[in-house]
Image: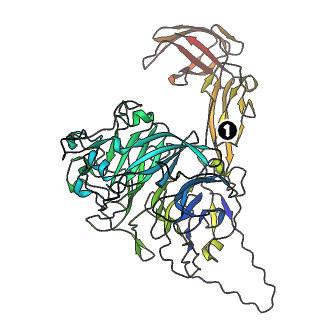
C-alpha cells in the first residue's frame, strides 16, 4: 500500500520553550483514520451553519462555501467543481436553490416565491442533462382534500400537504423552466367516500396512494413528507423516501408531465403511478404491523453500478418509533424485477424482497455504542457506498460521520465541529447536526485542475489530524474501445475513465491503438490514472491482431489448408519437425479447442474433433512451435 505521509515540523525559537503534547482524544474534528478507510473527500453542510465544507480523510479543509442564508439540508458536487444546494432564511422549507462555483461565486439562484413551487425542501437530484429534480410540498386546501376523498375529520384548517417532484432547467443567473412535474395528488385511492372518483379497494391498487393512510407522525398538515430522493439514469426512474409513511417509493421519470398525471405512458406504461413500494405494506392494506421494516428512514439512494452492491438501494433506517427500541441501522436491498423490468411481489401482493442484502449493525446484534452514545439518529442521516466495500455513515443528530468496513469495524470517524459557531477542541459538542455527508472519490471530475491542498481544520486544533497519514486505496478505473480481436489496420480510439490518464503499450499513440504499428500477435494495452491524492491506478486489456488469410503460406511453418464441417480438418506441409501448439477460437476470442501435436516434416493430415457445438461463422487458428507463430482465419 502506498503512503503519503503528512510532515509535521515544529520549530523552537525560544530557549527554554516547553512543548506539551496532549494525548487526549479530540472532542471535535477527526477522531480516527486507518489504512482500511477509503481515502476520499467528504462534503457536508452543518445544519445550523452558513457553510458547506469539503474535507479530506485527515479532517483538513480542502474547500468551503459560504451561503448568504442557512443552507437547507445538504449539498452536492457538480462535475465542474460547483455545488448545488437548497437554502433559505429559516422557515420549514427552502427559499431558493443555488449553484456556487469552486471559488464560492454565486452563479445561479432561483427563488420560486409566489409560484406553485414555493415549498421546496429536503433534497435535490442531479440529472445527466444538467437539470435538477427537487421535492416540492403540494399544499391542498380542505376543500381540495375532501374532493379527493380525504377524511374531513383528519385535516388541517389551513392546508394538508401531499408531495410533488419537479424538474428544473436553470436559465441565466436567476431563472428556471419547470420542464417536468409529478404530483402524488394525481394518484389517489380511498375507501371511505364512494361518491368520489378516487373510490376503490386499496389492497387491489398498490400503484395508488391511500389518501387516508395512517400518518404515524400525527400531523394534519404534513400528511405526506418525502425526505430523500435519487435518480437512476439507466432506468429513468426516481426513488424517494417517504418519512411520514416509513416507506420508499419508485416512480417513472420517462413520462411527459401529462403522462405523469395519468396511469399510462412512459417506459413502464404506467404513467405516474407508483411502480414499487417497500418498508410498510400496511400503507396499501397488506400485512400487519409485524411486516413493517422501516421506521422514519432517510436517504434512499441507488448505488452506482460500478461500486459494490451496484444498482441496489441503500438507506438510513432511523428506527424512530421502532417497537423493539430506538436504534438506527443502515440497509441495502435489491428490489427484484421480471424480464420486462416490472417489480415483483409475493403471492399475497406484498412487494419483495423478504430480506436485506446488507445490514449494519447486523440483525440480532445490539445497537453499537461508541463515544458513550448508542448509534441512533431520530431524524435525518445518510449512507454512501465506497469502492472498497466500506460504507460511510452520517449519524445526523450527533453530527458523527464514520466509516464501516465489510466486517463491521469502524475505520474512520469524524465529529462535525460547527453548530453555527465552531466548538473549541476539548468542548463536548451539543446538537452539532448535519443532515447528510457525501463521500466523493479522488477521481471525481469536480477535482480536476482544482487546488486540493490542505488548508487547516475547521476546529482550532486536532492532535489526530496533526499525526494523520492518508492512504492510497486506488481509484476504480476502466477503459473502452479496444476489441479482443482485430484484423483491421485502422487505428482504434480508446476512452479512459476517469478521463485524464495515459495509455501505453505496443502500437499506442496518445489515445489510439494502431494495429499496423503493433504488428500481429497478442498485445497488452494499459491505462494509468493518477488521482488528486497523487495515488496511481492502472488497468490492462489484451488485443489479438492477426492477418486474414485463407490459403496461408508461412515459410517457417509451412502451408495449412482447412476443411471445416463440425470439426476442423487440416492438410499441412510441415517445414520443421517438433512440438506444435494448436489453439482454435471464435472471432470474439472464446477458446473452442486446444491441442498439442508432435509433427514430422512433410505433408500431413489431421482432424480436430470439437468438444462443443460450433456455430457457423468465422474461426481463428493459432499455431505455435515455440519459435514461430501463425494465426489463420477460417470461415465455416
* Residue in the image at 31% along x and 45% along y: 353
Q: Is residue 15 magenta?
A: yes
Q: Is residue 478 above or below residue 444?
A: above
Q: Is residue 538 above or below residue 376?
A: above
Q: For label 1, count other residues whose C-alpha is less than 10 Å away and answer few (under 14), some (14-19) or many (20+).
A: some
Q: Is residue 462 above or below residue 330?
A: below
Instruction: Report the side of 257 relative to 9 (left or right).
Output: left
Could you tell me what secondary structure mostly forms the magenta stretch?
Answer: loop
The residue lying toward the viewer, choosing from 118 and 407, is 118
Residue at disc 1, secondary structure: strand
Q: Which residues are magenta?
A: 7-17
Which quadrant of the structure image shows residue 104? bottom right
Residue 247 in view (yes/no): yes
* Residue in the image at 35% along x and 36% along y: 337
The residue lying toward the viewer, choosing from 7 and 623, is 7
Q: Where residue 506 sits: x, y (%)?
A: 73, 31
Q: Which residue is mark 1?
A: 526
The residue lying toward the viewer, choosing from 630 and 13, is 13
* Residue in the image at 35% along x and 67% along y: 327
Q: Where residue 121 sits: x, y (%)?
A: 47, 55
* Residue in the image at 19% along x and 45% along y: 193
Which quadrant of the structure image shows residue 424? bottom right
Instruction: Looking at this view, name the residue that lies furthest to the bottom.
Output: 16
Q: Is residue 183 magenta?
A: no
Q: Where residue 556 sits: x, y (%)?
A: 71, 16
Q: Where residue 429 sits: x, y (%)?
A: 51, 77
Amino acid at each position: 500500500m502506498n503512503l503519503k505521509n503528512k510532515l509535521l515540523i515544529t520549530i523552537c525559537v525560544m530557549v527554554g520553550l516547553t512543548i506539551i503534547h496532549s494525548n487526549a482524544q479530540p472532542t471535535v474534528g477527526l477522531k480516527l483514520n486507518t489504512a482500511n478507510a477509503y481515502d476520499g473527500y467528504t462534503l457536508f453542510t452543518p445544519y445550523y451553519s452558513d457553510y458547506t465544507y469539503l474535507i479530506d480523510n485527515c479532517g483538513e479543509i480542502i474547500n468551503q462555501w459560504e451561503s448568504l442564508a442557512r443552507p437547507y439540508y445538504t449539498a452536492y458536487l457538480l462535475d465542474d467543481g460547483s455545488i448545488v444546494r437548497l437554502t433559505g432564511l429559516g422557515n420549514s422549507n427552502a427559499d431558493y436553490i443555488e449553484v456556487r462555483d469552486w471559488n464560492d461565486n454565486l452563479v445561479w439562484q432561483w427563488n420560486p416565491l409566489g409560484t406553485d413551487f414555493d415549498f421546496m425542501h429536503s433534497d435535490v437530484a442531479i440529472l445527466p442533462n444538467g437539470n435538477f429534480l427537487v421535492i416540492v410540498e403540494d399544499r391542498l386546501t380542505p376543500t381540495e382534500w375532501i374532493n379527493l376523498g380525504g377524511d374531513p375529520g383528519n385535516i388541517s384548517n389551513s392546508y394538508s400537504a401531499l408531495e410533488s417532484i419537479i424538474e428544473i432547467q436553470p436559465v441565466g443567473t436567476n431563472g428556471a423552466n419547470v420542464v417536468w412535474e409529478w404530483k402524488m395528488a394525481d394518484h389517489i385511492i380511498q375507501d371511505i367516500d364512494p361518491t368520489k372518483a378516487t373510490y376503490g379497494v386499496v389492497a387491489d391498487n398498490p400503484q395508488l396512494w391511500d389518501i387516508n393512510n395512517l400518518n404515524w407522525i400525527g400531523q394534519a398538515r404534513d400528511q405526506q413528507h418525502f425526505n430523500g430522493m435519487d435518480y437512476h439514469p439507466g432506468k429513468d426512474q426516481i426513488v424517494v423516501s417517504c418519512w411520514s409513511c416509513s416507506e420508499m417509493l419508485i416512480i417513472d421519470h420517462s413520462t411527459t408531465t401529462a403522462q405523469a398525471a395519468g396511469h399510462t405512458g412512459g417506459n413502464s406504461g404506467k404513467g405516474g403511478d407508483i411502480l414499487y413500494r417497500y418498508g410498510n405494506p400496511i400503507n396499501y392494506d397488506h400485512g400487519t404491523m409485524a411486516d413493517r421494516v422501516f421506521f422514519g428512514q432517510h436517504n434512499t439512494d441507488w448505488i452506482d453500478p460500478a461500486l459494490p452492491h451496484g444498482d441496489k438501494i441503500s438507506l438510513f433506517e432511523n428506527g424512530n418509533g421502532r417497537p423493539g427500541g430506538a436504534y438506527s441501522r443502515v440497509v441495502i436491498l435489491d428490489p427484484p424485477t421480471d424480464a420486462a423490468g416490472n417489480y415483483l411481489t409475493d403471492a399475497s401482493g406484498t412487494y419483495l424482497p423478504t430480506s436485506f442484502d446488507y445490514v449494519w449493525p447486523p440483525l440480532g446484534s445490539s445497537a453499537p455504542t461508541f463515544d458513550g452514545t448508542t448509534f441512533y439518529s431520530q431524524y435525518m442521516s445518510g449512507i454512501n457506498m465506497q469502492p472498497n466495500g466500506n460504507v460511510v455513515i452520517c449519524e445526523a443528530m450527533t453530527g458523527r460521520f464514520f466509516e464501516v468496513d465489510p466486517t463491521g469495524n469502524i475505520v474512520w470517524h469524524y465529529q462535525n465541529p460547527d453548530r453555527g459557531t465552531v466548538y473549541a477542541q476539548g468542548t463536548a459538542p451539543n446538537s452539532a447536526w448535519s443532515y447528510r455527508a457525501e463521500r466523493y472519490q479522488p477521481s471525481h471530475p469536480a477535482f480536476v485542475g482544482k487546488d486540493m491542498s490542505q488548508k487547516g481544520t475547521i476546529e482550532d486544533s486536532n492532535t489526530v489530524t496533526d499525526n494523520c497519514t492518508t492512504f492510497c486505496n486506488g481509484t476504480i478505473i476502466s477503459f473502452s474501445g479496444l476489441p479482443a480481436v482485430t484484423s483491421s489496420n485502422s487505428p482504434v480510439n480508446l476512452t479512459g475513465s476517469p478521463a485524464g490518464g495515459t495509455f501505453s503499450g505496443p502500437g499506442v499513440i496518445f489515445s489510439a491503438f494502431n494495429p499496423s504499428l503493433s504488428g500481429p500477435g497478442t498485445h497488452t494495452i494499459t491505462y494509468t490514472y493518477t488521482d488528486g491524492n497523487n495515488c496511481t491506478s492502472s488497468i490492462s486489456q489484451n488485443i489479438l491482431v492477426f492477418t486474414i488469410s485463407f490459403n496461408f503460406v508461412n515459410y517457417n511453418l509451412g502451408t495449412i489448408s482447412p476443411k471445416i464441417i463440425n470439426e476442423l480438418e487440416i492438410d499441412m506441409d510441415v517445414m520443421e519437425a517438433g512440438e506444435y501448439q494448436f489453439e482454435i477460437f471464435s472471432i470474439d476470442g472464446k477458446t473452442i479447442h486446444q491441442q498439442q501435436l508432435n509433427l514430422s516434416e512433410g505433408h500431413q493430415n489431421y482432424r480436430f474433433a470439437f468438444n462443443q457445438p460450433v456455430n457457423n461463422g468465422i474461426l481463428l487458428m493459432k499455431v505455435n512451435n515455440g519459435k514461430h507463430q501463425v494465426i489463420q482465419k477460417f470461415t465455416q
